[in-house]
Image (cartoon, helix red, strand yellow):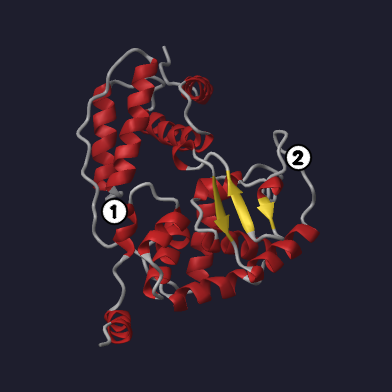
Amino acid sequence: MNWHVKQEDFQSVLERYNRYLKGKGFSESSIERYSNILRSFLKFADDAHPSTEKANEFRDYIIAKKQARATINNSCYALGNFYKMHGESFKFSVLRPNNSIPYYFSEEEVHKIFDVASRNIKQSAVLQVLFFGCLRASELCALEDRDLDLKDLTIRVRNGKGNKDGIVFITSEWAKTVRKYLEIRPDRVIDERHYVFYTDYGRAWNREALHRMFILIKQRAGIKTQGAVHVFGRHTPATIMIAHGADVRIVQKILRHNDIRTTLRYAHVSDHTKRTMYDKCLVL
C-alpha cells in the first residue's frame, strides 16, 4: 500500500483553505500569504492533514531558520486557521515583537539599486512605485490601472493591511517612468483585472516573483545590507524621510500606520542628522 500523499491532494486542501478564509472575510493579500504558508507546511509534513504536533515541529523549524518574530507569528496564525477549518485547535505561544531598529538601505544603496533597475523599464517602474509609494509587496502586486492617477500623482491602495483603502503619493519623476512603461506594456486582462504589473508569462504578479526580482537586482548592485522588498519599500523611505526632518506624525500618515509607535521605530537617524537638526532647531 502506498500512503504517499499526492500533490493533487495538497492542491485540493489549499483550495478549500482559500474558500474558508474568503468566507471568514480575510483580504486577498492575507489569503495569499496564509496559503503560501500552508503550502510550505504541507510540504514540510508531507501530509495533507498533519497533526498539531507536526505544526509545532514546523514552528521550531522556522524559528531555527531565524525568521522574524512577526513572520513566525503569522505562520502560526495561518496554521491556526487551517486547524479551525477542521474543527481542531492549534495553540502556540505568540512571540513578542522585536522593537529593535529595523534594517534599512542607505540613500547611496537606494541609488545603486535604482541604477541597476534602470536597465529594464519594467523593473525600474516596479521599484519606483514600491519605494516612492511606500507600498507593501502585496499592495504593489494588486495594483490595477484604475488605481493610478498620474495627473494628480497619487495611487489608490485597495484592500491594504487590515482591509483598508488608502491614497499614497508619487513623484513627478516616477510618473514619467510609469508612463514610459505603460506605453510599451501590452494590455492584458488577468482574472478580469487590468493589473499594472504582471509576469513576462502573462500571469498575475505575486510576492515571490517580486522578491526574486529584487534580490537579483540587489546582488547586481553589490548591496550587502540585510533586507529585501519590505525593507526597501517601507523601512527605507520612512527612515530617509525622518532623517530629512519629516514630522513622525506625517510619516505615520504616509505609511498608513494605525499606531504611531510603529512609526517611531524609524526614528533612529544618524548622529550626523541629529547634530544638524540640533544646531538648526535649538536656537535662542
> Label 1: how many residues lie within 10 Å, few (<14), some (14-19) or many (20+)?
few
Task: Identify the residue under disc 1.
Answer: 261
Q: Nearer the viewer, residue 254 or 75?
A: 254
Q: Position of residue 53 (x, y in %)?
A: 23, 24
Q: Position of residue 21 (x, y in %)?
A: 46, 24
Q: Nearer the viewer, mark 1 or mark 2?
A: 1
Of the residues under marks 1 and 2, which one precedes in the sequence?
2
Secondary-structure class at tag 1? helix
Residue 229 appears in the rendering:
no
Numbered circle sitting on residue 1: none
Residue at the (21%, 44%) spot, across then down:
96
Q: Is residue 119 above or below residue 61?
A: below
Q: Quadrant of residue 59?
A: top left
Q: Position of residue 272 (x, y in %)?
A: 30, 84
Q: Nearer the viewer, residue 260 or 212?
A: 260
Q: Quadrant of residue 24?
A: top left
Amino acid carrying mark 1 in the image: Arg
Secondary-structure class at tag 2? loop
Amino acid carrying mark 2 in the image: Val
Task: Identify the residue under disc 2.
Answer: 189
**81 left or right of 164 in image:** left
